[in-house]
Image: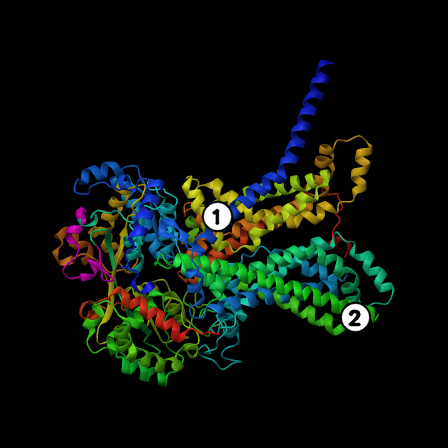
Amino acid sequence: MRKSRFFRSPSAKQLVLASILAMGAGTPALAQENAPDPTDWQNVLDQAKGQTVYFNAWGGAPNINNYIAWAGEQVQAKYGVSIEHVKLEDTATAVSRVITEKAAGRDEGGSVDLIWINGENFAAMKEQGLLIDSNWAEKLPNYEYADIEGKPTLTYDFTVPVDGQESPWGMAQLTFYYDSEILAEPPTTLEELAKWTEENPGRFTYAAPPNFIGTTFLKQVLYGVVDDPSVLREPATEEIFAEVTAPLWTYLDELKPNLWRDGVVYASDTTQLKNLLADGEIDIAMTFNPGEASSAINASELPPSVRSFVMDYGSMGNSHFVTIPYNANAKAGAMVVANFLLSAEAQARKADEKVWGDPSVLAINDLPEAQKAYFDALELGPATLQGEEFGKTLLEPHASWATMLEEEWSKRFMRDM
Amino acid sequence: MVQTLYARYVMTMTNRALNAIFWVAPALVILLLTGPLLAGLIGVAAPAFGYFPTLGGVELTWDHLHKAMHVPGFWHSVHLSIWIGLVTTIISFVIVIGFFAAFWDAPFFARISRFVSPLMSVPHAAAAFGFAFLFAPSGWLIRLLSPWATGFDRPPDWLIINDPLGYALLAGLVLKEVPFLFLMCLSAASQINVDKRLKLARSMGYGRVWAWLTVVMPALYRQIRLPIFAVIAFSSSVVDVALILGPNLPPSLPVQILRWMNDPDIEMRFVAAAGAVFQLGATLVALMAWWLLEMLCSYLMRQMQSKGARHQNDQIVRQIFNIAMLAMVTISAASIVILGIWSVAGYWRFPEALPRAMNLMRWLDNASNLWGPSFNAIKIGVAAALISVVQTLLCLENEKRHDIRLTQSALRLIYLPLIVPQIAFISGISILLVRYGLDGSFWPVTIMHVVFVFPYTYLALEASFHDLDPRYMQTATALGKSQNRIFFQIKLPMLLKPILTALALGFAISVAQYLPTLMIGAGRVPTITTEAVALASGGDRRLIGIYALVQTLLPAVGFALALVLPKLLYPNKIYFSKQREA
């Protein structure tokens, strides 16, 4: 059932039943009309004044938490909107909460106003009708400078059309990093990586899927072994999947005995990978935030000799967003916050590695001079790749691939009775 | 004359009001505690069998149970949960009972118990992080021994933390369950006149350990049986410790359920509910296995006892338990120390024994972030502990007055919240609360905490209350005192110490609550624990150190107050306690 999670349509019987139940539980049709229209921005600002926006965002990184706190001070001073950061350990918690509220028939005055989101969580919320129905994000004043042409991932979030139901916030690219004092020349092709792990057993690992960085690593390898990547843009079927991914499993099986802990356990996420590198347990780690290594050097979590690299044949990239649930209590306030997060000032500060180091979604060269100046002032750390060094961005495969990759990986690598 | 009459009238009315309060207390407790539980269970059972209209589940089906069973590694996860629940309890129980038997009236006992009680206040997650920072291949222990003793200049590629069979998880849980059982045994022991029993057995030539096991253990065991069941249930369904130390390919069942719940594919919520039903089964199997072990052990004990052996030479046994307990205390203390070091560490390269630079930067950066959540935790903890202890006392007093065994058996229901996996039934309740707009504020969160705090305060107070020497009460009654006066003027002062301990325990339990705070609080009532778990997901060890220490400090202050207050309030009173006798 998981295979077709994004496109499965409920049967007619279920639809009828669900709508009867929905009518009994509340009036969702009316609730939708509460969303203010961002084309009348002054009206949004008026409504937003005095509102408190409960911003549900992952709370695992103090620098990001501090950035959100800063954004809160700014929107309070500028627009009279206050932000309460609900620190999540997993974005799905916020999705759960909205589902719970829908189940309980609370179609207005919900407890979640804004969610930091992308990929599967967005797809799930969109499919379940848990988001504002209208295209609000593209009508935000600051959306004007979003780099729609240069960054296709802003309009297709893991191949799911965004349709203005979430507002862009930042960019991500699968980036590897290593300590240049320990490892002189990192392997930048799959063959080199396999050879290097064979010569240095126990010094490399990836996160176990379905952790996103683990799944992303599978996709990255898949791009490297597949003959024609265009097949990945289409929904996967059992046969195509088996055929296309066969070399991937061969590669991973060969890698396994030479991995950290002999491939019996894997890292749980990017931060564990970072800690393992800091402790010298592994020599190569990976992250989705190209500025992470430099940020970690600033926070004395990693030694100053750490450097980044990407694979020669390109690297997986995507975007992250903020979105507003259909039943949010402070919709106008949430739009004001989303718009502020898109401003050059906020985006430049986010890109500053001393603050966060998350790449901007704006087309910086198109910005008016005064706003461009924010970015000109930024300095990138030695561990951050720049421009050309990033190489080609590999687009996320169709969402069905991720699900099947995760399932197949579980079947092959999970210990069973 | 009129005044006296009026005063008497007021007194009678007050008395009647009090009587009424005592009368309704147990009913209130049962309503308060089992209501949410039943609602929560239905909220779990329904989707497990396919019924959850909002998600399009409108027909009853076995599909979700089947689907859960066919997830790769599912049965391994189930076995892990049963095994962890059972073995953690066996090891903790043996260490505690062995130590009690070996050292009950030795001076060493008093010294150790002074160390053990504060360990109770270390939250599970904090202890688990400390354990991992200590024993990981790049942990403090190997750093201290490297490279001079081990020759390592890189961490060895050893599988210690997150091992597939869950030994690290077991060890981490034992570190926390030993202090809990220790406290429970201590409270139970003060009720059964241990010294008299021992004297008798020893006069007949029984060895120290064997005498204890023969004459004390059977009576003591009856008192700690429910706490033991709570330990089994808790360890078989623990989430936070398992996330930190447990296996991950596959994880133990509760962690697997959490993953399903957090899966963006909403269909998986049905599977998560089905998983919760299996979790219930796994916990039950662990409990049944313990029950079988109980029968086997008591049979073996009877066989051995009937042979009449005295087992006088028990030096080796005593040494073993001495070492076990000392190791336990040392590891726990070292865990706290390593958390402290990480909280001030700069960059710390392996195998340096200490970080190159230490500074208070992180503490200062986070001081303002710590205050709000700590204050919330204190408010909720104090309120939940007070409500629970007052309710406990009212129930116990009512039982005593009316000698109602029915109430007693009904009260067994309150232990259900300790046996049903939190992760599942809380989500059922939160739907109910959201429906009536009751989530996301102080009182609902506090009441939800009471559901989990009350069983512990009841466990902690029940024995002390029932075993108060009845002669005091008989004397007071003979002197014409009303039941209410006896309750307030004799029972409460006599119970001051256990009451304060129960308050501190309740506070500690409340502070450590994660899922209820998060789900009922809708994220709007952040406490130090919800913040700590959120930050832990970022894996920043310096911050984990800070939050774990603060999380430890709060309940520690509670326990310290419980220890100090009686001495301040009644400096001359001599308390009936083991420490004094020893």
Q: Is residue B536 visible?
A: no
Which of the pair B384/B262 is nearer the observer? B262
Q: What chain does badge 2 belong to?
A: B
Task: Give percent across and percent down for residue A195.
Answer: 32, 84
Task: Give percent across and percent down for residue B415.
Answer: 60, 51
Where the C terminus of chain B falls, by quadrant?
bottom right
Badge 2 amino acid? Met
Residue B374 circle label: 1
Which of the pair A308/A191 is nearer the observer? A191
User: Is residue A379 shown in magenta?
Assistant: no
Q: What chain does badge 1 belong to?
A: B
Q: Is residue B423 left or right of residue A210?
A: right
Tag 1, which secondary structure?
Answer: helix
Which residues make up the magenta segment? Answer: A139-162
Q: Residue at x 26, y 76 (%)?
A: A244
The residue at the far front in this view is A13
Tag 2, which secondary structure?
Answer: helix
Q: Is residue B392 left or right of residue B153?
A: right
Which of the pair A132/A172 is nearer the observer? A132
User: Is residue A140 shown in magenta?
Assistant: yes
Picture layout, residue A113 above or below residue A10: above
Residue B304 circle label: 2
